[in-house]
Amino acid sequence: MPALETKLLENAFYEFSKASDSIITHYSTLESQIRELKEELEEKNRALERASEYLYTILDSLPVGVVVVEEKTILFTNKQAEELLSEGIIGNLNDGNLKTGEVKNGNGHYRWKKEKLLNGFEGKEVIAIEDVTEAEKVKERNERDERLMAMGEMAARISHEIKNPLGSMELFLSMLISGKLRKQEKKYVDYILFGVKTIDRIINNILSYTRPRTLALKQEELFSVVKDTLDFMSVSISIREINVDFHATCKGCVSFDPDLMKLVVMNLISNAIDAVDKNGRIKVDIKENKRFAVLIISDSGVGMSEEIRKNIFNPFFSTKDKGVGLGLFIVYNIIKAHGGYIEVESAENSGSSFLIYLPKERLSVV
Ligand SMILES: Nc1ncnc2c1ncn2[C@@H]1O[C@H](COP(=O)(O)OP(=O)(O)OP(=O)(O)O)[C@@H](O)[C@H]1O
Ligand SMILES: [Mg+2]
């Protein structure tokens, strides 16, 4: 091969090997850059995953239900909302153009608010649902306390004013009856005397339970009070062929006035008897939580409308032909005097439950 050609070939090889060295160097630089980028991407993905985990944990820990919807389709629900979904609440919220509202489901009470999503998520809406059942119960209890205290004071004042002239009437009627009267006249006076005594009994009830006498507190079992009262009422229960299921989850050992508590149980059971038909069911249970012993008296009876339920503790509120309407007023005052409270769950034709909460430790005398 001529020298010139050899030289050219050598040069070409030299250039080729230089170029391939440079390619190898660039390739390995590129490779390490890709590796770095991949690591960076993986790190970013992990951070993104952690961020979304963090977001979902926050959403699931919220004490409100969060739902994202598009038209009628549910796109996302947090844990709270999933529970509400299973209770059939959410279906009621996604209708119409309302932005806020309230839903009642059985004894649950929920408040919701709807907002449109922005920033590229247009068309989607977020609904926040808050369970306000407990807050509403406390609100209702406080309103009831205020109302009944005012009513109680008024009833006590009126009763006090009636009591004196009533006493004189009874005295004069007794004198009249012991004098010379014809048979028919004596019968009439007897009727009047009976009426006067009935009024006197009602007034005594109001006076002694609106401001109950000092409680004779004893540390006793609610179980024995319920058992004694049910035994005492067994005749009126069996005559109507009512089935009473007394199953005490615990004995309910708290401090209370046993005589007054018997009156409470008696009033609640006799209301339950009035509410159920023949072959009806009354269930009695005693439970407890951290702060309260809870006596629960449920019946399978007629139940109450919302309107009736709101008024049952008012003095002289009765839906019965021969009811005076003082039973639950007395119950309310006795439980209040014990530092406890009452909850009522009821729906028309679905029976009623009265829950009596008695504090395990009494902080103050009400
Ligand atoms: N278990 C129940 N089921 C359905 N309604 C009830 C029940 N308990 C109470 N009620 C309603 O509450 C009202 C008031 O009850 P409350 O015991 O105060 O008076 P009453 O039973 O009518 O008369 P009384 O003074 O003789 O007790 C009743 O008339 C009834 O409408
Ligand atoms: Mg009653």
Image (cartoon, rainbow, N blue to C red):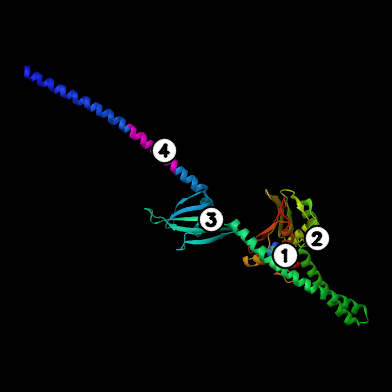
Mark 1 C-beta closer than 8 Å to ligand 1: yes
Residue 278 visible, this angle: no
Instruction: Between residue 348 and residue 152, name the one nearer to us.
Output: 152
Task: Point out the tag, 4 or 2, that comes first from the N-terminus.
Answer: 4
Q: Secondary structure at mark 2?
A: helix
Quarter of the image where the C terminus is located: bottom right
| Residue on which the image places disc 4 | 46
Q: Identify residue for label 2.
A: 235
Quadrant in the picture for the N terminus: top left
Which secondary structure lies at badge 1?
helix
The amino acid type found where label 3 is placed reads: Glu
What amino acid is at disc 2? Answer: Val
The magenta segment is 35-51
Q: Which of pointers 3 and 2 indicates the residue nearer the eye? A: 3
Disc 3 and disc 4: Cα gap in Å? Answer: 33 Å
Residue 287 placed where, x, y %?
70, 50
Q: Earlier in the sequence, mark 3 or mark 1?
A: 3
Distance between mark 2 and mark 1 Cα atoms: 25 Å
Number of the label disc, if any, that sits on residue 329:
1
Q: Determine contact: label 2, label 1, CB under 8 Å.
A: no
* Amino acid type for the residue under numbered disc 1: Phe
Q: Which residue is mark 3?
A: 130
In 3D space, how far apart are the residues under numbered discs 4 and 1 (Cα atoms)? 64 Å
Residue 68 higher or lower than 39, as above or below: below
Residue at position x 30%, y 30% in the image: 31
